[in-house]
Image (cartoon, grey):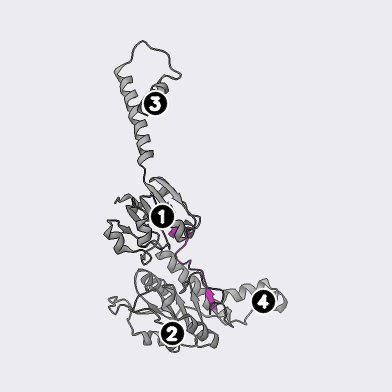
Amino acid sequence: MVDTLVSGASASRRVGSTPISGTSKEEEFQEFFLFLFYIFIYLQKIYAMKIVFLDAATMGNVSFEPFERLGEFVCYESSTPEEALERVKDIDVLLINKVLVDKALIDAAPNLKLICIAATGVNNIDVEYAASKGIPVRNAVGYSTDSVVQSTFMHMLSLVGGAPYFDESVKSGRYSRSGMFTDPNWNWWELAGKTIGIIGLGNIGRKVASIAEAFGMKVCYYSTSGTGHCKDYPCLPLEHLLAESDIVSIHAPLNDRTLNLIGAKELAMMKPSAYLINMGRGAIVVEADLAAAVDAGVIAGAGMDVFVTEPIPEDHPYIMMRHPERMRLAPHVAWASMEARERLVAIMAENIKKGF
């Protein structure tokens, strides 16, 4: 192999050149440098990191070029548990989003040196077992704040502003046939002067609060950890927040304190004119209770981006409602603006560059 590289380097020097009687020191140095370059390319190909992404379809059409620059990169749109076991056999770096990384998968990858997840939470990875094998697990933090905040207000403005109704009014021809310059048959209202109660005042919750203030809203919050330290807004007990808020917006993680936090009892504490938005985790809300409450007019409506089971079944309570127009549903995309996904890929690439 080395002889081939040397002959290749020499040939590349001779092609198109005029024959000379001797070789200068400078030419010898250039030839040696070219030889080293070929050796470097060869070794890089042989020893390049093998990187595999098992569920790349979850990232949409974002570019994976940052991964391609770091080694031999292969991505699969999705992987069944059986396929995953085969696909990790000789890899160095494992990239996943929602694939379950358990003991069996880790043991199937004897060369595995690093696990990077395209998310903040690592609940689908057996972190303890990975650590016992000396394999670091690196997550991504802060990439989706702006995306989730914007999605929160997308739901909020759609609910209070009646955009779907007005859009349908024009497109259906009802407005054209009305004989009036306007359609006053849907009552919508302003955010200014209303109260937003935020459940979970982390980075996302704080940014929601600041933008709500720009709309002229009053802000209060409930600390799910019980250790609220923000002095900018009043921290209220949950029952007080629910009773006083016109919009309740959830931005909390799922844990023992937040599981089923909002059920029939809590929904009954809210104003009949109030809306509930959930950008945290689906299981924070008892889904059947929320569907029943919205249908019965206990609250005015809700906006949901997250669900207990994802994707939701076709007979989900939200799908079977008598008044679906009171709900805004999105398939867990609040995190996934184009910019957020690009930031996520960049963070994951940096996590790989940190080494093992």
Q: Give how far apart the Cα atoms at labels 3 and 2 are.
A: 73 Å
Residue 345 position in % (x across, y down):
41, 55
Q: Secondary structure under badge 1? A: helix
Residue 15 position in % (x across, y down):
44, 20
Tell whether 184 sits left or right of 333.
right
Front residue of 154/67: it is: 67
Q: Give how far apart the Cα atoms at labels 1 and 3 are.
A: 39 Å
Q: Give how far apart the Cα atoms at labels 4 and 1 are.
A: 49 Å
Q: Are marks 4 and 2 in contact (CB under 8 Å)?
A: no
Residue 306 position in % (x across, y down):
46, 72
Which residue shows up at 31% across the image and 16% down it? 24
Tell whether 137 sits left or right of 248.
left
Q: Is residue 332 magenta?
A: yes
Q: Which numbered tag is attached to residue 181?
A: 4
Pointer 2 residue: 263
For the image, the number of numbered tags is: 4
Pointer 3 residue: 4
Which callout, 4 or 1, points to the residue nearer the camera?
1
Q: Are marks 4 and 1 in contact (CB under 8 Å)?
A: no
Q: In which quarter of the image is residue 256?
A: bottom left
Q: Quadrant of residue 96?
A: bottom left
Location of the N terminus by quadrant is top left
- Three-letter amino acid code at disc 1? Val
Q: Do the residues labelled 1 and 3 touch (CB within 8 Å)?
A: no
Pointer 1 residue: 345
Q: Give how far apart the Cα atoms at labels 1 and 2 are.
A: 37 Å
